[in-house]
Image: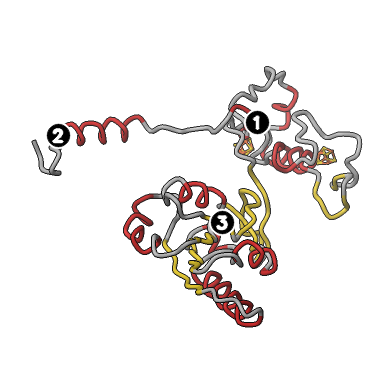
Amino acid sequence: MIVGSQKSIDEIWDMIKGFKKVLVFGCNTCVAICHAGGEKEAETIATLLRMRAAQEGKDIAVDFSSVMRHCEPEYFEPVMEDLKKYDLILSTACGVGVNFLSDRTGTIPVYPGVNTSFYGAVESPGNFVELCAGCGNCILHLTGGICPIARCSKTLMNGPCGGTNKGKCEISKDVDCAWYLIVERMKKLGTLEKLAEIQPARNWSTSRDGGPRRVSLEHIRAYEEKEAANTDSAGGKK
Ligand code: SF4
Ligand code: SF4
């Protein structure tokens, strides 16, 4: 899931205080699980902003609502007309949701209420840990299921480095050395000798530096195109 943390009310207030009608718009998927931006958090932010407006004598109306996901049109298209009643949408989705919505709200700005942090998992209640960096070319089959890109502090592909110490990374005794974990895991799996195999130079072209990446599912695209070709302009079947 995508993990984020809520921006401080002071930062949010600075963003919104020039507007008159603000909607705090929650997303009930990833950011709800990490208690950053679901409906409950949207309600709390809206309440705090109303109190702040009253304290500072500002005439700002703040409402809240939410949908299941900000990153799929089927969830927010039904509420598009409601969104247009506001002069600012404060989205508490991750950055994907803010971008996606921004492209669709015309002259209404969409501001972020959450700092998007990483792709991670729930390590224990209230603790989230980064486990994947979305590199687009997964090599977990070579590293015992432990990601050196996200979990090694230097993103080393052939660690450990000289800083590893009793299973911990040199950056902190509280951070596991990813390569220590990889070696121990591969020992357990009986695949340690695989680490000695020479791998070709890694292809980083699938990673982050070439503009926005896309994944297209051809069978779904072909189906949608066929459906569109069989539908007339009034929405009926040809
Ligand atoms: S190798 Fe890439 S895709 Fe696989 S877990 Fe690591 S960052 Fe994610
Ligand atoms: S100590 Fe381990 S995790 Fe830290 S930078 Fe070196 S190889 Fe990576």
**In terms of image quadrants, where is residue 144?**
top right
Q: Is residue 150 left or right of residue 37?
A: right
Task: Mark 1: give few (<14), some (14-19) or many (20+) Cα within 10 Å.
Answer: some
Residue occupied by mark 1: 142
Q: Is residue 87 left or right of residue 1?
A: left
Q: CA distance from mark 3 to mark 2?
A: 39 Å
Q: Is residue 149 above or below residue 88?
A: above
Q: CA distance from mark 1 to mark 3?
A: 41 Å
Frontmost of labels 3 and 2 is 3
Label 1 sits on a secondary structure element that is: helix
Residue occupied by mark 2: 230
Mark 1 or 3 closer to N-term? Answer: 3
Q: Which numbered tag is attached to residue 213?
A: none
Identify which residue is drawn at 73% across, 39% down: 182
Label 3 sits on a secondary structure element that is: strand
* Type of the residue with mark 2: Asn
Q: Is residue 53 above or below residue 28?
A: below
Quadrant the C terminus occupies: top left
Label 2 sits on a secondary structure element that is: loop
Measuring from the top left, give residue 153's x and y in whole percent.
79, 41
Mark 1 or 2 closer to N-term? Answer: 1
Mark 3 or 2 closer to N-term? Answer: 3
Measuring from the top left, give residue 231's x and y in whole percent.
15, 37
Tag 1–tag 2 contact (CB < 8 Å): no
